Image (cartoon, rainbow, N blue to C red):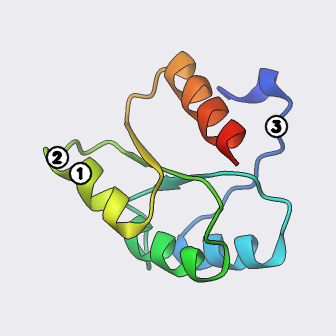
Amino acid sequence: SMMKHTGAVLLWAKDGDEAIRICRSNSTISLILMDLMMPKLDGFETTRQIRTFRPQLPIIAQTAFYEDNGREIAMKAGCDDYITKPIQQSDLVLLINQLVKKR
């Protein structure tokens, strides 16, 4: 609902396996907002696998469970940035704009 006014086309995956399948089959994806706590395959491993075939795709890790080293772990897994829930719309839009403009 936060992104409705942006005109972005959103794709949603119920788990890491589905996220990988969607990303493999859709080369027009320009950014991933990756939940780190997903069923089947967590966001860390999902990110690692996506990086093998889409190394330049911006990935923002999102989590409700803040950890002191959470950002570092997400970055080591291949994420470009990290945001914690509850997510502020202005923070998310700013972060997305920064990452998409870099690419």
Lower position in the chain sequence, tag 3 or tag 1: 3
Q: Disc 2 to disc 3, how far (Cα)?
A: 30 Å
Q: Disc 3 to disc 1, how far (Cα)?
A: 27 Å
Q: What residue sits right under mark 1 in the picture?
A: 70
Q: Are marks 2 and 3 in contact (CB under 8 Å)?
A: no
Q: Which residue corresponds to the image point at 79% horizontal and 25% vertical from the top-left?
A: 6
Q: Which residue corresponds to the image point at 37% horizontal and 34% vertical from the top-left?
A: 85
Q: Which residue corresponds to the image point at 54% horizontal and 70% vertical from the top-left?
A: 15
- Which image quarter: residue 94? top right
Which type of secondary structure does the marked residue at label 1 adopt? helix
Q: Which mark is residue 67?
A: 2
| Number of numbered discs on residues | 3
Q: Disc 1 to disc 2, how far (Cα)?
A: 5 Å
Q: Position of residue 34 (x, y in %)?
A: 51, 55
Q: Are marks 1 and 2 in contact (CB under 8 Å)?
A: yes
Q: What residue sits right under mark 3 in the picture?
A: 8
Which type of secondary structure does the marked residue at label 2 adopt? loop
Which class describes the residues within 10 Å of circle 3: few (<14), some (14-19), or many (20+)? Answer: few
Please name the amino acid that badge 3 sits on: Ala
Q: Position of residue 33 (x, y in %)?
A: 57, 49
